Image: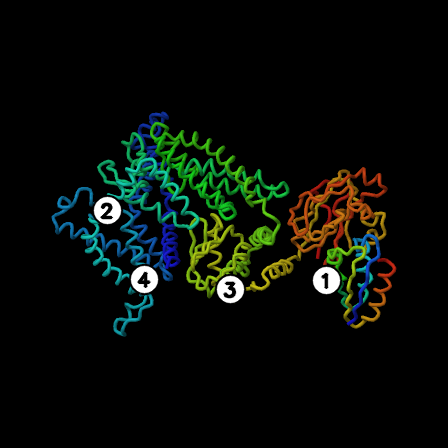
Amino acid sequence: MKEFEYVITDEVGIHARPAGMLVNTVKPFESEVTIEKGGKSANAARLMALMGLGVKCGDTIKVTINGADEEAAAAALQKFLTENL
Amino acid sequence: MKDKIFGVLQRVGRSFMLPIALLPVAGLLLGIGSSFTNETMLQAYHLTGIIYPGSVLYTILDIMNKTGSAVFNNLALLFAMGVAIGMAKKEKEVAALSGAIAFLIMNTTIGALIDAKGGIEAMAANSTTQVLGITTLQMGVFGGIIVGLGVAALHNKFYKIELPQVLSFFGGTRFVPIISSVVYLVVGIAMFYIWPVIQSWIAMLGNLVMNSGYAGTWIYGIIERALIPFGLHHVFYMPFWQTAVGGTAMIDGQLVQGAQNIFFAELASKSTGEFSVSATRFMAGKFPFMIFGLPGAALAMYKCARPEKKKIVGGLLLSAALTSMLTGITEPLEFTFLFVAPVMYAVHCVTAGLSYMLMHIFKVGVGMTFSGGLIDMTLFGVLQGNDKTNWIWIVIVGLVYFVLYYFMFSFMIKKFNFKTPGREADDEETKLYTRADVNARKDAEKASASSDTTSALILAGLGGKNNLSDLDCCATRLRVTVIDESKVKDILLKQSGASGVIHKGNGIQVIYGPRVSVIKSHLEDYMETPESDNPMVEESAPIQTITENKKSETAKSIILSSPMNGTMLPLTDVEDEAFASEALGKGVAVEPSEGKLYAPADGVIDNLFDTHHALGIITDDGAEILLHIGIDTVKLKGQYYEAHVQNEQRVKKGDLLISFDIDAIKNAGFKVTTPMIICNTYDYGTIEAVASGAVKVGNDLLKIEN
C-alpha cells in the first residue's frame, strides 16, 4: 500500500473536468485508489463520488493506492496532480 | 397493568371490525331498499306508477330492505361470532362455531327461565325481546359481545387440551364447542338474574346521557375524537350505537335500543315522520367535519407546504381528503398532523365535538352505517328528504367548517411552524420516509409471490416472526401484540409505507390507511414462506440492504427525460474536449433556450456544486447523472446561478433544480451548452440518445441499457 498527501493549488479545485481526468488516470491501473478529504473518502474510479468530496483550492487530500501495480499508479497520479491540480 | 388493559381493549376494539365491516353493505341495502319502498317518498318523486306493492321492482327493493334489516336485527349473533374470531389466537373457525352455539344456548336458557317464571308478562316491561325466534332478555349486542369474549377466552385456554385416551376424540378443538355450551348454559342462568339489574343501571346511564342535553353531545363528540389516536373509539361509541346507553324507542311495536339501531329501525319503518335526533346526535356530527372540515385542513396543509414539495404533498393530501369525504375514514388525514402537531389534533377534537352539538341543536336526523362520508350522507340524509332529516344543515354547518378549518390550520401551522407534510426539514427521517414511499410503490409493482419486500420490511420492523404474539387489523391500522416491544423498529415500519406507529406496552399499532387489510393478508401469506424465518433486513444496515435489492433488479432500460427546453446536441459535438471525448462518461447535451434545469428522473441530489453550475443525481434505478450547465462555467463562481434544491434532497422527475441567467452567462463569455453525463457508464451496456432537434422538459432524451 502506498500513501501520500497533496495540497490542491488549482483555483477551482476538483470540479467536473479534472475529476473526469483523474478517473481516467486511475482507470488503466489495477490498484484501488482512494482519495480522502476531511474525513470523507471516495473511490477515485467513481466520478460522482470524487466530485462529492468537494475538494477546493488549498485543501489537502490523502491518496491511498493499494494493489499489484501501486508503484506505477502512484507515480502516474503524482504526475497528474502536479500538472493539473 | 395499564399497558395490559390497553392491550386487551385494543384487541376487543379490533375484533369488532369484522361485524362492523358488514354494516356499510347492509346499510346500502337497507338505505336504497327502504327509501324506494317508502310511500311518502315514492309519491314525492312521482314513482308510484312503476314502484307499487306487487310489482317486480318493488319486490326487489323490498328484498333489499329486508335483507339489510336482517343484518341489523341479528347483530348480536354476528358480534358473538365476530368477536370470538377476532379474539381467538388460532383455529379461529372453531371459535366462530363455538360462539354461535354458545349464543343459542345462552338465549335458549334464558328463554326457558322466562317461561318458568310465567312468560313475558311476568317480566319487567320492555325487558324482553325475540332473538332468532327465541324469547330472551333484551341484551342488544352486549349479549353477543359477552358470548364472543367468553368463548374466545375458553377457546384460547382449551383448543389444545388433551383428554384421557377413551375421550380423546373430544379433545383439542372439538372440546371448545362442548365446554362453551356448558359454560354458557350456566351463564344463561346467571344472566337471567343479573341482567335485569344491569338493565336498570344502563337505563339510568342512558337517562343521564339523554338528559345531559347539548353539552352532553359535545362531550361525547370530544371523547370520541380523542380516542382515535389510541384506537379505542370503537369501544367507546359502540354502547351508544348499539345498546340502551344510546337510548331506546318503540318503533312499529318493537322495542329498539341503541342509537344506530333506532335510526335503522326508523329507516325501515314506513311510519317515520322525522328521524329521532336523540339517536342521531351520536352520529350526525361526523358529517360536517369529515366531508368539509378535514378537507379544509388538508387544503391548509397543502398551501403551507414548501413550493418544491407541493406536488408530492398534494397527491398525498388529496387522496387522504377524498377518503375522508367519501367514506368518512379520517385516520389517513388525521395522522398526517396528529404526530407532528398534537396541539392541532386537540383543537380538532374540540371543534369536532362542537360539530356533534350543532347537529343536535339543528335537529339533523341523519344516521350512518360506519362513518360520516358523502355516501352515507346521500343515502340516509339527502335521499330521505329534508323534511325527515334536516340534512341541509350538514351542508350549511359544513361550509362554515371548511372555512374554519382552513384558516385555523393555516394560522396554527404558520404561527407555531408545525412540520406538516411538505414543511419538514430534510432530516434523515423524512428522507427515508419518502424514499420508502417510492420503494414501496415499486415493490408493489414488482410484487411476486416469492419475494414480498414490503411484508419483509414490516416483519423486520416488528422484530421478526418470533416476536409476534398476534396480528390483526382494523379499518386503517395493523394491530399487533409483540413479545418484546424494544425490538420494534419504527423506521423500518415507516419505510414500508406506514404513516405512523403507536406503542403502548406490547400493543403496537401501525397506521397504513384503508389498504391495511391487503397489507395484512400479504404479511400473513409471507409469514407462511420459509424466507420469513430469516429476516432479510438486518437492523444494522436497513437502508443499504434495500438499495442493493433494488440494484439487482435494474436489468432493464432506463429512460432519462430532457432536463431543459432547447435543442439536443450529441455529446461529441460539445465544444469541450473533456465532454466530447466521453472521458467523463457517455451522455447527451442540450443547448438550452430557457434558463431552467429540471430533474430528468426520480432520484436524490448527490452532489450540488458550491458554485451551483452543476449537480449530480443518483436515480432510483442507480444511474449516476452529472448535469453541467455551461462550459467552463466553474469560473463564474456561482454568479448567475440559483439552486432550488440542496444536497441529499429527494427529487421527482420534472422538479426544478437550478435556474440561471442565460444572457448574463453568455455575455460573460461562456457557452451554456449543458451536458448530461452518466458517470457510471461502465455499469451499463449501451447509452444512447433517443431524441434529436428541439426537445422539451419531460420528453424522452437518453436511453440506458444493461
Do the dots labelled 2 and 3 sit on one chain? Answer: yes
**What's the CA distance linking mark 2 and mark 3?**
51 Å
Label 1: how many residues lie within 10 Å, few (<14), some (14-19) or many (20+)?
some
Answer yes or no: do the residues labelled 1 and 3 have beta carbons within 8 Å? no
Disc 3 is attached to a residue of which chain? B
Q: From this viewpoint, is residue B24 visible?
A: no
Residue occupied by mark 3: B532
In the image, residue B335 above or below residue B162:
above
Q: What colour scheme does the image use?
A: rainbow
**What's the CA distance linking mark 1 and mark 3?**
36 Å
Q: Upstream in the sequence, badge 3 or badge 4?
A: 4
Answer yes or no: do the residues labelled 2 and 1 have beta carbons within 8 Å? no
Q: Upstream in the sequence, badge 2 or badge 3?
A: 2
Quadrant of the image for the C terminus of chain B?
bottom right
Instruction: Say which amino acid is labelled 4.
Output: His
The numbered disc on residue B201 is 2
Residue occupied by mark 1: A41
Answer yes or no: do the residues labelled 2 and 3 have beta carbons within 8 Å? no
Instruction: Say which amino acid is labelled 1.
Output: Ser
Q: Give the x, y percent position of residue B313.
A: 57, 43
- Residue B12 image-quadrant placement: bottom left
**What's the CA distance linking mark 2 and mark 1?**
74 Å
Answer yes or no: do the residues labelled 4 and 1 have beta carbons within 8 Å? no
Q: Give the x, y percent position of residue B360.
A: 35, 34
**What's the CA distance linking mark 2 and mark 4?**
30 Å
